[in-house]
Amino acid sequence: MINVNLLPKNLRRVREPGYWRLLAIVFPLLVLGIAFVFQMFAYQTEQNLRTEKQARSDQLALLQPYLREQQSLLQRQRELNQLISVEKAVHQNRILWTGEIAGLLETLPPRGTGAQPNIDFKSLTMSALNPPQSNPDKYEGKSVIAEMNVSGDVAGPDVLAQFIRALENSKSYGVSFHNAARQNESDLYTYTLTVGALAGSQP
């Protein structure tokens, strides 16, 4: 028996191939599967990062006591280095006051025949200069490492001039004269001067 479809073409039922139905089902499932895989990968990556961060935080917490101890040791080392620097500076620029005073006494004029010395020190103050200093108006511009302010009595201007010349001719000292004045009703004079210990004169 032969069936003839007399309906117009636009009203006729068209049979589509079966693989289109299968593709319409499989494609959305495939897209959902891929999206799920990417989601799982992102979630796993996030979990791994969180785990790594927590592990680093735990490791840092364990190292904190050692880090604090290291900081303390570094601070102590800095303090010790400062003390060592000060100690070196003291030794390199030390003033041997005993030697300075002894050298200063050697420049004094000879003692007179009377009971009263030709010159004496009633006041002697000392100060170290670190770093050494130089002044074109003092000690002929030479660098000095210490100064001694001296005052006292002297038998006369000639004795004082002899003392000052001895200091000026010394390789170890320079001198800066301040003043001299005769005492009332006496042959003695009072004087004041500053003696500088020259740099490089120390042993």
Image (spheres, rainbow, N blue to C red):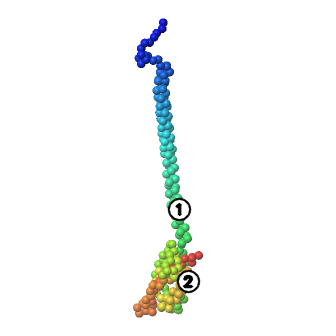
SS at mark 1 in the image: helix
Q: Amino acid at mark 2?
A: Ser
Q: Amino acid at mark 1?
A: Asn
SS at mark 2 in the image: loop
Label located before the other in sequence (1 or 2): 1
Camera-nearest residue between 134 and 119:
134
Q: Which residue shows up at 44% across the image and 88% down it?
A: 180
State the image coordinates of residue 7 (x, y, percent, origin top left). Answer: 42, 14
Residue holding disc 1: 81
State the image coordinates of residue 11 (x, y, percent, origin top left). Answer: 41, 17
Residue holding disc 2: 170
Label 2 packing within 10 angstroms: few (<14), some (14-19), many (20+): some
Camera-nearest residue between 188 and 139:
139
State the image coordinates of residue 40 (x, y, percent, origin top left). Answer: 48, 33
The Cα atoms of the two marked residues, 1 and 2, are separated by 38 Å
* Quarter of the picture holding the C terminus: bottom right
Q: Which residue shows up at 50% across the image and 89% down it?
A: 161
Query: Is residue 181 something that shows in the picture?
Result: yes
Residue at the limit of the structure toward the top, as seen here: 1
State the image coordinates of residue 137 (x, y, percent, origin top left). Answer: 48, 81
Q: Which residue shows up at 52% across the image and 56% down it?
A: 74
